[in-house]
Image (cartoon, rainbow, N blue to C red):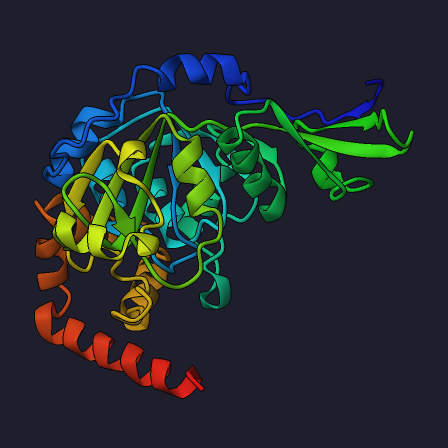
Amino acid sequence: MKTLLEGQGQLFSNPDPDDARAYFRTKSRRLENKEMDLSAAIEKHLHDGDYLGIGGFGANRSPLAACHEIVRQRRQNLGLAGHTATHDMQILSVGEVYDRVDVAYIVGLEARGLSKCSRKYIESGKVKLTEWTNQLLATRFQAAALNVPFMPARGMMGTDTFRYSAAKIVECPYTGKKTLLVPALYPDVSIIHVHEADIYGNCRFTGITVADLELAAASKRVIITTEKLISNSEIRSNPHLTRIPYFLVDAVCHVPFGGYPGTMPGEYFSDEEHLKEWLTAENNPDTFKDFVNKNIYECKTHQDYINRNGGIEKMKHLRKQELMLHREVTP
């Protein structure tokens, strides 16, 4: 194929499917117990310099407990897929754990406003950025899941987003027309929060999928955090409900309310008061330092964090909100 144009962005990961397959061949397909503590899973599977993918969409079904743990363990020099990244990126920016980002949606917390912490770090010059759209970053995961080095697409051409991407525009060998190619993205580690999982890593979740199925298949290592642990017999009794199979998963961590303060569909609504506290605290560096110490570094577990912000009574309230909202939108 004839290359017509190339984006000037840096490619942060190797798109070669043969290199990825060489790693995937070393992964065990045995049905073995993968349950472990969240801190142990992060310590074992996420290393300085790794490329990290985060599941969920915005603050919806995001593994926020795991993001706290990454900051507590002071991981450094991570690559990050900034795919619908909102409060998860805000947390990771606190510890400056990443130094390169594939950008689709970052810094903003949607209607809640902008994270000054994330923005300050992104603008510090310490972080390398390459731009994509949300859809095309998801397409990169899809290419990796399919074990091909790139995927063709029709978007982004003629934009500054293309200019600052690492995509290529080529002459299509079939039609002779301009076609965009985006490279496969194989994260070293991805973390996905689900509703239910067994100890082997078979996972169920409801609500929007976004790119999580492709992300799980594309990633070399997958850490699952789950609201509930269920039996393997329950998984086998309804196999069609399994969305992520065990052989993709490396660790299963039982973390009730692991998406707090975000939303877990059907379980609990986002803690909008607490998210506003985060944004307000960021206005003053001294206040924010104390806020972060209280809510991340001084907490040994995610349960400690929840207890400091209303405990089980707050979670009951958020669950009631979610159930009321679910009834309103269900026909």
The quarter of the rendered structure image containing the C terminus is bottom left
Q: Quadrant of residue 36?
A: top left
Does residue 144 appear to the left or right of 90 in the view shown? Answer: right
Query: Horizontal and vertical percent for residue 8?
Result: 70, 24
Q: Nearer the viewer, residue 227 or 287?
A: 227
The answer to whether residue 227 of the structure is visible from this angle is: no
Query: Horizontal and vertical percent for residue 193?
Result: 29, 50
The answer to whether residue 58 of the structure is visible from this angle is: yes
Q: Is residue 203 above or below residue 275?
A: above
Farthest residue, direction front: 237
Residue at image location 31% in from the left, 41% down from the top? 245
Residue at image location 57% in from the left, 40% down from the top? 137
Q: Nearer the viewer, residue 272 or 65?
A: 65
Q: Quadrant of residue 170?
A: top right
The quarter of the rendered structure image containing the N terminus is top right
Does residue 84 appear to the left or right of 64 in the view shown? Answer: right
Residue at image location 84% in from the left, 28% down from the top? 172
Q: Is residue 50 above or below residue 160?
A: above
Residue at image location 18% in from the left, 47% down from the top? 296
Query: Horizontal and vertical percent for residue 157?
Result: 79, 39
Does residue 140 appear to the left or right of 163 in the view shown? Answer: left
Q: Is residue 77 above or below residue 35?
A: above
